[in-house]
Amino acid sequence: MNGPTTVRDERKPLLVADGISKQYGGVTALAGVTLRLHAGEVHCLAGENGSGKSTLIKIISGVEVPTTGTITVDGVARTSHTPRDAMAEGLDVIFQDLALFPNLTVAENIGITSVLAGRRGIVRHGSMRSQAKRIIAEIGVHLDVDAFVEDLTIADRQLTAICRSLAKRARVIFMDEPTTALTQREVATLLKVVENLRQSGVAVVFVSHKLDEVLAISQTITVLRNGAVVAEGDAADFTAASISRAMTGRDLGELAPTETVHASAAPALEVRGLSLAGAFDQIDFAVQPGEILGLTGLLGSGRTEIAEAIMGLDPADRGTVAVGGTERRVRSIDDALALGLGYVPGDRLSQGVFIERSIADNILVATITEQTSGLGFLDGRRMDRHVQDSIAGLAIKTASPHAPVSSLSGGNQQRVVLARWLARNPKVLILNSPTVGVDVGSKEGILELLQARAAEGMAVLVISDDATELAAVCHRIIVVHRGRLAHELAGDEITVPNIVRELAA
């Protein structure tokens, strides 16, 4: 259901970014983009990774200077401004990393930025706590103002960041992928907070790849593709399909699992009695060659811990892992690699890539010992050919294999991680949240790639709580609840409503 519509034409915009262009050398990141924001409006800014969303936000918030264009706030136009100017104008951005101080309390995080901005020499903790309590009450949530941020859930950190924006008297708040790491219940709470902000007159720019959330909360939508606006208007005039089409320039197909995979003599992966105190207990399942098995559960259910135990990152106390009939107690990642396992972690930035190293280095690191000549020296031609084949095979969009991974969009960074592991040709590939923070076009490409590798005989284990993603590609799904296997879905039972119901059980 779309959010409530608003009358826009008769009102004066709170903020207008008009004709914004940005060039980096010979590369055009933005080309004449115009964005209008009204008070009391949730405006979705949509686009694939690399479409220019982040660049536009950085320009509006004063982090970057536009090549051309103006930014008008309350009728006052300027060609650029500083972050301090943006703060004074009531513009604030909540980036994905939230930029909170983990060793400070909720109250201190909410109040510290406004204290520093005001250049007051004395920090009054009592007034900070009072201010924090007042703002928390205004948005209708529950937060312990004396709790340290490092002890909070991701959802509560997100709420703390919103309260910090309000403490700075923000009138326009940009939220960059705010629901990426939240459970469905936490998403519902956050969307309610966003609606409360809207009703209080705050303009919220909501950046998300989750189109159902976009349509549920937004009144207006602007879609960017290749640095230009390709669609804009009332949310009521859009559907998920039309947003996807505008973002990608094509109609995305409906993914569906391939035909049923039948049990073979030896499962590709067999887990028996896997247990880790405080995380999970007596986990038993098997994955057949050519099968995509989904492992799902809410955050904290033990789903990620199971994957990390199988890979030896956090070894299990008890139980065994067998690959192709070869059984072993996996005590380290070397044990897992020797068995023929591969793992794409959930946090690609801290665990998946060497962010400032080149694309080539990131692809080669897993197979470097195989890139040698007969004399044992590294073979430059073989390495170049391997990198080029990987870039082409996974459709990684880059001008050069020598560019740093940090220069890539989220979807292309994820493809680099996949390229590294697929180069090892594992018997079993385990993927933790493989499309988190990835746009719809890249998501479809990644899922199609998994289906293609499964069709070639690779066993795939997907850990995710994205019901649509799981229903699209999985032959079977097992549900984890409080560290135990609670239910299995197969065949016609695999539907989005059934998966959502099992997650909520």
Image (cartoon, rainbow, N blue to C red):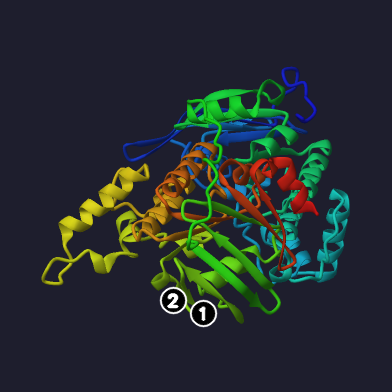
Q: Nearer the viewer, mark 2 or mark 1?
A: 1
Tag 1, which secondary structure?
A: loop
Do callouts 2 and 1 mark residues in contact (Cβ within 8 Å)? Answer: yes
Q: Earlier in the sequence, mark 2 or mark 1?
A: 1
Do we see residue 166 in this rendering? no
In the figure, is residue 401 to the left or right of 235?
left
Circle 2 crowding by C-alpha within 10 Å: few under 14, some 14–19, many from 20: some
**Height in image: 417 above or below 366?**
above
Task: Name the kind of residue labelled 2 in the image.
Answer: Asp
Quadrant location, the N terminus: top right
Do we see residue 372 in this rendering? yes
Quarter-of-image position of residue 306:
bottom right
In the figure, is residue 219 to the left or right of 372?
right
- What residue is rendered at 40% in x and 48% in y? 456
Residue 160 point in image, percent of width and height: 74, 58
Task: Name the kind of residue labelled 1 in the image.
Answer: Arg
Residue 324 point in image, percent of width and height: 44, 66
Residue at far front of view: 265
Along the viewing direction, whichever of 206 and 442 lies nearer the viewer:
442
Tag 2, which secondary structure?
A: helix
CA–CA distance between discs 2 and 1? Answer: 8 Å
- What residue is rendered at 37% in x and 45% in y? 394
Residue 35 is labelled as none
Residue under pointer 2: 335
Circle 1 crowding by C-alpha within 10 Å: few under 14, some 14–19, many from 20: some
Along the viewing direction, whichever of 241 and 137 lies nearer the viewer:
241
Residue 438 point in image, percent of width and height: 53, 45
Residue 158 point in image, percent of width and height: 71, 55
Quadrant location, the C terminus: bottom right
Residue under pointer 1: 329
Number of numbered discs? 2
Residue at far top of view: 10
